[in-house]
Image: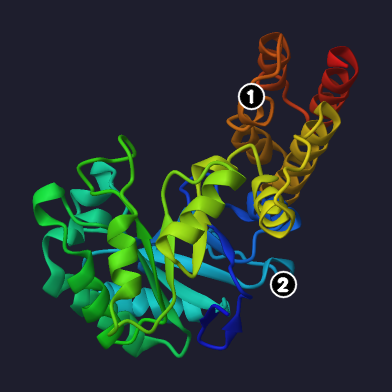
């Protein structure tokens, strides 16, 4: 059984990855509905929280139906990370997660995210500052190392466990790989098999089908799997994996009606959370993902991303259901 602090996640949990501009409350709600066991917020800048930045503050929104849910923070300054962890604790998430894995230049250039992979001592100090500033379980998501010449994940795992983290998620790529090439889960297996390691170890990277999830579970012995890009526009993947684990058979792929229903719910929840205008704008990036691979969808997508009222968009989605059938 995988357990983070007092959070019991079951025998082999499936976690929704924290993804910028994706893992907001409406999307998390969909993934929860379709079988995700643990949810994470978009990553939040520690500096932004301290400055009371509106966008950062809004990312603190969590709801009881999401639980267990963690809020992820990032930064490169010990005091700022400690203070932001205290701010996060006030909204009562189930845990605080630290991002030491984001590879994008605007984060790395500030000495945060995967930028911290160059300085393990700093990573340890930042983690310790967060652990010491909250009573919540603290977890970390990171990568194998900065590049192939500096893969240091075994040392990182031991040292972060020693300063008090309750679980570790490892994206099986280096920062230099970004999201390209193949992930190498053999390094995750080394961490998991290290006799010194007693916290849950979750694997992340390239899981995009039930078959691969089962193969990686059996091959690498992780305590659970975190799924990111494969869930975008396809929240069904969580239940598909669980069904395959239980039965060895694949669930039918979502119908057009299923896809329309998911997009409809996502839109309604986005509007409810962010307001009509912002909810509609932020939803536009998702339509192509929900209907990926559907023939003749281009015309419908163009309409969906140009309409300016939720009522019109809902009608357009019904047209998709009717016209493609």
Image quadrant where residue 3 sits: bottom right
Quarter the N terminus occupies: bottom right
Q: Residue at x 29, y 43 (%)?
A: 104
User: In the figure, is residue 85 to the left or right of 178?
Assistant: right
Locate residue 254, reporting x and y percent.
Answer: 77, 35
What SS does tag 1 mark? Answer: loop
Q: Residue at x 72, y 25 (%)?
A: 308
| Residue 301 visible in the displayed image | yes
Q: Which residue is mark 1?
A: 292
Q: Earlier in the sequence, mark 1 or mark 2?
A: 2
Locate residue 148, reporting x and y percent.
Answer: 14, 48
Q: Is mark 1 in CB contact (under 8 Å) with mark 2?
A: no
- Observer-nearest residue: 117 or 79? 117
Of badges 1 and 2, the one in the foreground is: 1
Q: Which residue is mark 2?
A: 64
Q: Residue at x 62, y 25 (%)?
A: 288
Locate residue 277, reporting x and y percent.
Answer: 67, 36
Question: Within 10 angstroms of label 1, few (less than 14), some, or many (20 or more) residues?
Answer: few
Quarter the C terminus occupies: top right
Picture disc at residue 63: none
- Real-space CA distance between mark 1 and mark 2, rounded to the nearest whole angstrom: 31 Å
Query: Is 253 drawn above or below residue 126 in the view shown?
Result: above
- Observer-nearest residue: 237 or 273? 237
């Amino acid at each position: 059984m995988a357990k983070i602090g007092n959070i019991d996640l079951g025998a082999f949990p499936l976690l929704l990855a924290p993804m910028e501009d994706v893992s907001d409350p409406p999307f998390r709600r969909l993934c929860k509905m379709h079988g995700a066991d643990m949810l994470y917020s978009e990553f939040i800048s520690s500096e932004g929280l301290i400055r009371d930045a509106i966008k950062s503050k809004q990312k603190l929104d969590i709801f009881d139906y999401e639980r267990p849910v963690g809020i992820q923070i990032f930064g490169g300054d010990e005091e700022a990370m400690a203070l932001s962890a205290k701010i996060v604790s006030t909204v009562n998430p189930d845990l605080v997660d630290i991002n030491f894995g984001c590879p994008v230049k605007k984060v790395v250039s500030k000495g945060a995210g995967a930028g911290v992979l160059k300085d393990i001592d700093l990573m340890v100090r930042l983690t310790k500052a967060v652990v010491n500033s909250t009573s919540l379980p603290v977890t970390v998501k990171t990568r194998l190392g900065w590049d192939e010449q500096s893969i240091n994940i075994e040392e990182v795992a031991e040292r972060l466990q020693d300063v008090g983290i309750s679980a570790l998620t490892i994206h099986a790529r280096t920062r230099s790989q970004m999201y390209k090439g193949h992930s190498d889960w053999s390094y995750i297996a080394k961490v998991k098999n290290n006799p010194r390691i007693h916290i849950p170890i979750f694997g992340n990277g390239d899981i995009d089908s039930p078959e691969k999830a089962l193969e990686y579970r059996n091959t690498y012995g992780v305590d659970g799997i975190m799924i990111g890009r494969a869930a975008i526009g396809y929240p069904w993947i969580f239940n598909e994996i669980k069904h395959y684990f239980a039965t060895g058979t694949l669930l039918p792929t979502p119908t057009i009606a299923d896809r329309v229903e998911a997009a409809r719910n996502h839109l309604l929840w986005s509007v409810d959370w962010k307001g009509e205008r912002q909810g509609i704008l932020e939803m536009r990036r998702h339509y192509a993902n929900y209907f990926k691979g559907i023939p003749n969808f281009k015309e419908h997508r163009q309409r969906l991303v140009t309409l300016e009222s939720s009522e019109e968009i809902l009608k357009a989605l019904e047209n998709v259901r009717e016209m493609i059938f």
